Amino acid sequence: MKFTRDESLAFFREHNKNEMYLRHALAVEAAMKHFARLRGEDEELWARAGLLHDIDWEITQSVENGHPVKGGEMLKKAGYEDEIVRAELAHGWEFSGVEPLSRMEKTLYTIDELTGFVTAVALVRPGKSLSGLEVKSVKKKWKDKAFARGVNREVIEKGAALMGESLEWLIENTIESLRPVEREIGLGTM
């Protein structure tokens, strides 16, 4: 069954009340849509996979409590496409055992963490904005292991290799993908 974006957003909100989780979901949604467009893939399918990738996060809060396996179960029970269920599981490959194989799965695996890192960099800039943010600024923060400790850089690097793309290209396109939704994800508010 194919769900609309509005139905998917309502499903996400039903299970996640925390605004921070919604902002992350919207960021990953925007990035996935952007990367689908670059690849000539189904933008709406990829966007929904991005929007729903942490559907279980408010319930589980950790991989130890079942993320993303619980999310995969929730999506399957709700009737989401197998591609979205599999992408949910593959974005937490290390914990679900489902290796990302398709372009969509590899992209979600990589972009989930990268959107968080780019957002963190924007939050420490004047105006908390993506405006004028360049790849070199993100790379400078990348080297600072104390910055955004919760972001798994190894996953991003592993994902970049899976995708066959450079880290710089991924950062550049992630920044570009987030600019149109800057306000919705809590940036550019100063």
Image: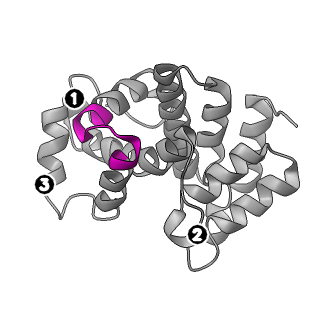
Q: Which residue is mark 2?
A: 97
Look at the image and give the residue range highlighted in magenta: 160-171
Q: Quadrant of residue 73?
A: bottom right
Residue behind mark 1? 133
Residue at point 21%, 58% (across, down)? 147
Other-residue count near label 2 (Cα within 10 Å), few / some / many at <14 / 14–19 / ≥20: few
The numbered disc on residue 143 is 3
Circle 3 SS class: helix
Neighbour tally class for label 3: few under 14, some 14-19, many 20 plus, Cα within 10 Å: few
Q: Position of residue 55 (x, y in %)?
A: 67, 54
Residue 61 location (% of width, % of height) = 57, 70
Identify the element where label 1 is drawn.
Answer: loop
**Does residue 189 sit above or below 21 in this rendering?**
above
Mark closer to the chain start, 3 or 1: 1
Determine the residue positioned at 25% across, 43% down. 121
Position of 156 with respect to 80 (left or right) is left
Is 113 within the magenta?
Answer: no
Of residue 102 and residue 169, the one placed in the foreground of this image is 102
Say if residue 51 shows up in the picture.
Answer: yes
- Could you tell me how many numbered marks the image carries? 3
